[in-house]
Amino acid sequence: MALAHVLGFPRIGAHRELKFAQEAFWKGASDEAALRATGATLRARHWQAQADAGLDYVTVGDFAWYDQVLGTLALLGAIPSRFGFDPKRLTLADYFTLARGSKQHFAMEMTKWFDTNYHYLVPEWTADVQFDGGVDWLLDEISEARALGHKVKVALVGPLTLLYQGKIKSGITHKLDLLPKVVAGYQQLLKRLQIAGIESVQIDEPILALELDDAWRDAFVPTYAQLSGSAPALLLTTYFGEVSDHVALLRSLPVAGVHLDLVRGADQLAQFVIDWPQDKVLSLGVVDGRNLWRTDLDQVLSKLKPVQAQLGDRLWVGSSCSLLHVPVDLANETKLDDELKSWLAFATQKLAEIVALKQALNGNAAQVEAQFVASRAAQASRRSSTRIHNPLVQKRLAAVTAADAERSSGFETRIAKQQAKWQLPAFPTTTIGSFPQTTEIRQARAAYKRGEIGHLDYLDKMREEIRVVVEKQEQLGLDVLVHGEPERNDMVEYFGEQLWGYTFTANGWVQSYGSRCVKPPIIYGDVYRPEAMTVGWSQFAQTLTAKPMKGMLTGPVTMLQWSFVRDDQPRETTALQIALALRDEVCDLEKANIGMIQIDEPAFREGLPLKARDWPHYLDWAVRAFKISAAGVGDETQIHTHMCYSEFNDILPWIAAMDADVITIETSRSDMELLDGFGQFAYPNDIGPGVYDIHSPRVPQVDEMERLLRKARGVIPDARLWVNPDCGLKTRAWPETYEALENMVLAAKRLRQTV
Ligand code: GLN
Ligand code: ZN
């Protein structure tokens, strides 16, 4: 009999109950008991859902008060010593201090969990870090689940993944120097689980989906040999990508079973199945934990059947990875129509899919026939729906030529014409797009959305805001102005709402970090722009000034990256569709006399695949998509782009290949050092290295920015250099924004006196 399980379930609650309980506790509006009670209720509810669906185990250990990596550290006692907490007596308040910082301590760093939009807290590796035991929360949770009558499988972040994902702070030269201590810590923990009667432990090692060097790869066998001695049965899980580099390793690893992600790594199955060791379970992740489409059950079943014939009881069926990355329950969707809903499965629906597959494998197909019928119907309707397939879009896509991605002239010709037209001073000053989003702006937008104020009222309010923003920029003496983006709630949602092929959920929340949740849009069909999206706003703003007004768009890769993307065509096809829609917007802006247009790509780097060998393919289509969106305009029209992160060196040839006339990037936090790579590479086009960090309310002084700019001049030719902040200003307040920009303009002026 095949068994069914999931690698984890979302912890936030269908109505973000955990978020509200956390935030109430942080504000002091509720006590620890109340927060703990909410956590217990959510865990109980999520286990019940797993049991009711018919899974063979409920997963315990996937819950976290803030983050599962921090939770693992708390469990092992491996919390950063700089906080001065006793690992064995860590309170919930201490735990939150680790995550969020306090007056005395800066918080632990946070970064993206592999290629997801989930952010984990980065372990701090020092010579004195301890692994000899911490909080008992996991054991408490196990008791809770048992008391509720559930059969428990415990999930843990694996030792090598934990080590790998941390950062060396001091005292060691290689993370693996800590391995003996880590292993001892896990041994102790596993022993406790065994004593508690736990039979099965899922141990997550997603680093196996990366390109590991020998030191890391070679660490697996000895580590697991030490762990599996006197421990519960270990199911080693891999996910987020295929692991076929490690077939031999995974076969020989002394664990009770291995889990493969067959959604991301569909082709790897055959290599593993042949002669799969007699003593090992093979768990197959066939239901997508990263996306929200209904599974094609027939297709998956046909893949699983031969495996079951071979493995029998040793086949487990599961989610590809934890369901943490999808929304909780489709039943709470009030905004989506029935047809769209019939195409989707959120975490709760995915439980039922996994069980349906298990039942069909175990000879109970009749019991789950309804699930299969619904799945079949969804696949058929997705294949033929005119809401998904738009012949206009497909025809246009098929006709795209290489020339469509190229501007008519090279950069030197273009920039000369642009300069002749605009006559900008040396070191031109500009901003990244948004200005402070005041309460009034937010209220007006919300009132308009709720239908409380009419279209004209709304238009008036936004225009008034644009007028103020333009006036302030004129006063400040900025050279290239923006309209300030008051009409935008979010840089993807704003465009998604106006494009065909995108839809939005009412409740499709996914945890991004801590209590922060996001509701990514869903791209379900061919993307088509029925009418102009930004032209009216930009055109109005341009009437208010003689200076250039920069149009402002979100680029194709970012539009894709921050959404749930269709799984019935390659990502690059969807990116190109978005690019064509944006191209029309760019051309319409040009026709409306908007002579500078910025196409933001903050998520460009995020899209990089986990394995470096897959980077060139991604970068090629990502660059192509950007260029197609930009290249419809004449030489005189200046295309800007903006990216806000601090690593470019390994992708500079592609950044240059995007051929934006001007790129603005984040550099102030790296003290302009980031720019060195651009210099060495002889990056050819104009560049605006951010001269101050917009994440802080602190007002930078003229001298500081002047110093940064002088540094920049050492690397980038004067004629190519722009002056701007690191990113958009929407999270800032006006007083500090005004002062900071005043100083920035002064810094640019001082520089001009020296040429
Ligand atoms: N134009 C956007 C803004 O200024 C860019 C935001 C971003 O890069 N994340 O808000
Ligand atoms: Zn930015």
Image (cartoon, rainbow, N blue to C red):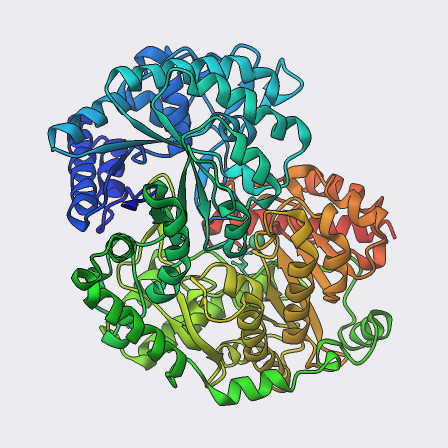
Q: Quadrant of residue 487?
A: bottom left
**Where does the image place residue 355, in percent across and percent down from the top left?**
25, 52
| Left or right of residue 357, residue 687 in this image | right
Camera sees residue 234: yes
| Vertical position of residue 643 compared to residue 125: above or below | below
- In this image, 598 relative to 81: left or right? right
Question: Which residue does the image show at 31% across and 54% down from the upper left?
Answer: 327
Q: Position of residue 706 (x, y in %)?
A: 74, 43
Q: Quadrant of ligand 1?
A: bottom right
Residue 153 versus residue 441: which sits nearer the camera?
A: 153
Relative to residue 160, is residue 516 drawn left or right?
A: left
Who is closer to the viewer here, 149 or 361? 361
Q: Position of residue 480 (x, y in %)?
A: 66, 66
Q: Is residue 487 visible?
A: no
Residue shown at 28%/26% (left/top)? 199
Q: Is residue 554 above or below residue 227?
A: below
Q: Position of residue 76 (x, y in %)?
A: 40, 18
Residue under the point 62% across and 44% down: 692
Quadrant that contains the N terminus: top left
